[in-house]
Image (cartoon, grey):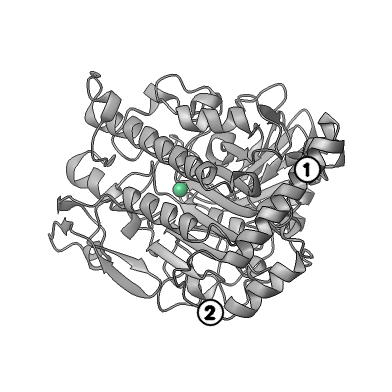
């Protein structure tokens, strides 16, 4: 193991920009040896349950992230109208988590939690904001920087949202050898942009933007009048190419798709923000176009996830590649689609921008042929911050101190008895008058506004839909969960606590005001 590790380090450490790397004969032979030795070992001695006892050392890691995909948007999570056969198969061949949470209820902070392994009570990006506040700091230590220490080649393809070309949060400054995609989240609303970024260079696409003098047009956001290159398709092509080129090395690919986020500028201009090249199997339905678009986007992404898994199989590297699929927050209703048609949050209350379950509980599917027991379902309560410790364990690295991160490896290996548990999970959110939430055991507390508002309490075992506030019946539980909130919240000059709203917050959950930054 260490031979391969130092070999890769020596050749590639310090390289800031990804360069295409062909087949590496040394590593190819090395992995052939590992594979044959492992296969021989399993065939000879391993009883069935031992098959899942150990992870292949230093496997590749692919994290595929959907954008605003709800807990109920996939067939394997109960979706009835939208077809997701590839992700359903991925779950049938792998593990489906039923109690997994995003880092936040909107894009940027959720992605920050995923990258740094700290919750929103103390991570550096706690909301969608301007590009300075939404940038990671130099001193943030990302999972990509971690995996670089073990010789991984690292790439992020898709929507980054944690720093732009002139801020320290740019992905090439945060441990990623290769970046291709959107830096700015409002730019990422536009599925037919005129340009994307490859590292620090702009790459021109064939699309042409409608120009009406809106300030957002300056960063490439808006609606295209000439639609040729669909960014999601470009990301898939890039991801397949990256995997193929790095087939003989250890790699970490963070594939941050933008589906099924709305083009919010498109919604305002045309009433339809669900941009997709064609409606596919939904073209013949009698649904309005935004509904067709919503469903077609998700099915298109599903097909592409299937292509990625197929490529891993074809290349013979599926057994040493962990693939995780999740979403950065709950579903939106910002693209003109009929929110109630698809029930995108399933049985959960709320949606994007809520700290109710619908805003933060997300699909999470793990796939790792030969290591994860097919068809397994885990009710382990985990969240995006756990990705950091999981990656560290898989790479054989020490977990840095001061994180809010517990490795999911025991669960992935089918050893729930060895799985460490969080005493609680924590979220805080700065929009819509602010809020905090805690999940501890079966209890869920939400306090609006944060720090001094009235706390609601729900029993998720008895009341998954968070319909009945039990705060008055269980004051001791409320006190305990409020103590967790107090411990978790670390004041930040960058994230001042908003003053209480002068008028009552909107009754409808998940409404977005047009002035909110993209994401
Ligand atoms: Ca999102």
Q: Quadrant of residue 42?
A: top right
Tag shown at residue 40? 1
Q: Position of residue 419 (x, y in %)?
A: 82, 42
Question: Could you tell whether 52 is left or right of 127 in the image?
Answer: right
| Of the image marks 1 and 2, the number of the one nearer the N terminus | 2
> Can I make out residue 55 in this image?
no
Residue 129 in picture, x, y percent from top left: 44, 63
The circle drawn on residue 336 is: none
Mark 1 near mark 2, Cβ–Cβ under 8 Å? Answer: no
User: Camera-side residue: 491 or 37?
Assistant: 37
Relative depth, front residue between 425 and 513:
425
Q: Which residue is mark 2?
A: 15
- Residue located 68% across and 29% down the image: 377
- Neighbor class of circle 1 (other Cα within 10 Å; few <14, some 14-19, many 20+) is few
User: Residue at image x 32%, y 32%?
Assistant: 296
Quick check: 454 above or below 219?
above
Disc 1 on helix, strand or loop?
A: helix
């Amino acid at each position: 193991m260490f031979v391969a590790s130092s070999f890769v380090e020596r050749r590639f450490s310090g390289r800031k920009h990804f360069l295409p790397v062909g087949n590496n004969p040394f590593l190819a032979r090395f992995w052939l040896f590992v594979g044959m030795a492992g296969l021989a070992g399993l065939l000879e001695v391993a009883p069935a349950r031992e098959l899942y006892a150990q992870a292949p050392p230093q496997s590749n890691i692919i994290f595929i992230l959907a954008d605003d995909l709800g807990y109920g948007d996939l067939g394997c999570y109960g979706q009835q109208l939208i077809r997701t056969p590839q992700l359903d198969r991925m779950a049938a061949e792998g593990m489906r988590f039923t109690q997994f949470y995003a880092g936040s209820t909107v894009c940027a902070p959720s992605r920050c939690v995923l990258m740094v392994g700290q919750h929103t009570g103390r991570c550096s990006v706690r909301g969608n904001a301007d590009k300075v506040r939404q940038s990671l700091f130099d001193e943030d230590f990302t999972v990509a920087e971690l995996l670089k220490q073990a010789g991984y080649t690292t790439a992020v393809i898709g929507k980054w949202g944690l720093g732009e070309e002139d801020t320290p949060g740019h992905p090439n400054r945060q441990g990623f050898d290769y970046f291709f995609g959107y830096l700015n989240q409002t730019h990422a609303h536009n599925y037919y942009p005129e340009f994307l970024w490859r590292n620090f260079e702009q790459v021109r696409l064939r699309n042409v933007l409608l120009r009406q003098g809106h300030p957002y047009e300056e960063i490439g956001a808006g609606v295209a009048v000439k639609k040729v290159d669909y960014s999601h398709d470009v990301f898939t092509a890039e991801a397949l190419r990256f995997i193929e080129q790095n087939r003989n090395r250890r790699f970490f690919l963070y594939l941050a798709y933008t589906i099924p986020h709305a083009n919010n500028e498109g919604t305002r201009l045309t009433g339809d923000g669900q941009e997709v090249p064609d409606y596919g199997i939904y073209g013949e339905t009698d649904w309005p176009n935004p509904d067709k678009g919503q469903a077609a986007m998700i099915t298109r992404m599903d097909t592409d996830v299937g292509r990625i898994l197929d490529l891993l199989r074809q290349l013979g590297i599926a057994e040493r590649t962990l693939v995780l699929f999740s979403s950065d927050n709950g579903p939106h209703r910002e693209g003109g689609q009929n929110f109630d048609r698809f029930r995108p949050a399933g049985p959960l209350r709320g949606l994007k921008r809520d700290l109710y379950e619908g805003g933060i509980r997300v699909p999470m599917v793990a796939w790792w042929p030969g290591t994860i027991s097919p068809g397994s379902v885990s009710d382990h309560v985990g969240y995006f911050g756990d990705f950091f410790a999981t990656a560290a364990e898989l790479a054989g690295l020490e977990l840095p101190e001061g994180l809010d991160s517990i490795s999911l490896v025991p669960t992935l290996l089918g050893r729930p008895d060895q799985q460490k548990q969080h005493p609680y999970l924590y979220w805080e959110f700065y929009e819509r008058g602010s809020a905090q939430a805690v999940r501890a055991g079966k209890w869920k507390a939400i306090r609006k506004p944060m720090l001094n508002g009235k706390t609601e309490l729900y029993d998720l075992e008895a009341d998954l839909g968070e319909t009945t506030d039990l705060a008055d019946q269980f004051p001791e539980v409320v006190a305990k969960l409020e103590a967790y909130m107090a411990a978790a919240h670390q004041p930040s000059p960058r994230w001042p606590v908003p003053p209480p709203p002068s008028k009552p917050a909107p009754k409808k959950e998940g409404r977005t005001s047009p002035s909110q930054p993209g994401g």
